[in-house]
Amino acid sequence: GTLAGYMFLAHVSNISVVGSHVNGTSRVGGLIGESYNGTGILEADLENVTVNGSTEVGGLVGRIWDGMTNSITQSSVKATVTGTGDSVGGIAGYSKSGDFIENFSEGSVQGNNHVGGIVGNTYENAGIRNCYSKNSVSGNQNVGGIAGLFNSYDDGVSNTYFAGTVTGNSTAGGFLGTYTAGTISSNYWDMTKNLLPGVGNGDRPQITGKTTTQMFAQSTYTGWDFVNIWAIDGDYPTLI
């Protein structure tokens, strides 16, 4: 990673990376390769970043796992992320027990298996709340606009949208590639841009396809906080 290859019991906040190129094999990130059992990443902004690797490759972090507060919060990633193997994501390649809270990602994400605009692969209580992605996401199997594989059985995904494009050969969805477990509430994806189901292995309630015009309307987003978290003005919602 630009900042660190491996971090243990660490916290990162108020950091910016511009124009960085990171190349590796496993656990490769635009900021951090791997964050283990830390207290989270807060307000990290990455722009014009290129990340290349094989497995567990992410625009911000390759792998984030364990720890009750090891989350990524109020961060943004504009990157080109390429992995030749599994678990490739616009923000993180793999997350176990690391939440994504009020983040967004833009650019492109390409991988093989478990490829997502926010995260490639989630496990245990790795939740996604109040996030969005506008990436072009492509891969072979388990490919989704937000997550390639969502298996957060102690958490869920809520108040999140996808407004990019998804291309996959098997189990590809406009929002999730494969859903295994986790609560779901008030999520949306732009179906005008994607001739795909919302979830590659079978659509789920509360993951709703909308036209681009509908995505520009505040009334679409049931239960979202447009006072403290979100803003909208004739376009897709943005994070305050």
Image (spheres, grey):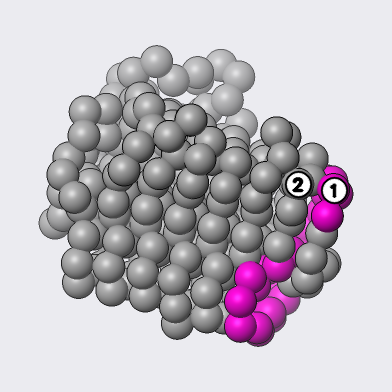
Badge 1 vs badge 2, beta-carbon distance below 8 Å: yes
How far apart are the alpha carbons under marks 1 and 2? 5 Å
Residue at coordinates 50% horizontally, 18% vertically from top-left? Answer: 225
Q: Where on the picture, by quarter, is residue 48? A: bottom right
Q: Amino acid at mark 2?
A: Asn
Residue hosting label 1: 9
Q: Name the quarter where the N terminus is drawn.
A: bottom right
From the top left corner, tell me how far across and down residue 148 is, in percent. Answer: 37, 56
Q: Secondary structure at mark 1?
A: loop
> What stretch of residues is rendered in magenta?
8-33
Q: Does label 1 or label 2 sit earlier along the sequence?
A: 1
Q: Quadrant of residue 168?
A: bottom left
Q: Amino acid at mark 1?
A: Leu
Label 2 SS: loop
Mark carried by residue 132: none
Q: Which residue is mark 2?
A: 37
Q: Nearer the viewer, residue 124 or 216?
A: 124
Q: Position of residue 83 (x, y in %)?
A: 49, 77
Q: Is residue 203 magenta?
A: no
Q: Please, is residue 81 above or below residue 39 in the view?
A: below
For residue 193, side relative to residue 35 (left or right): left
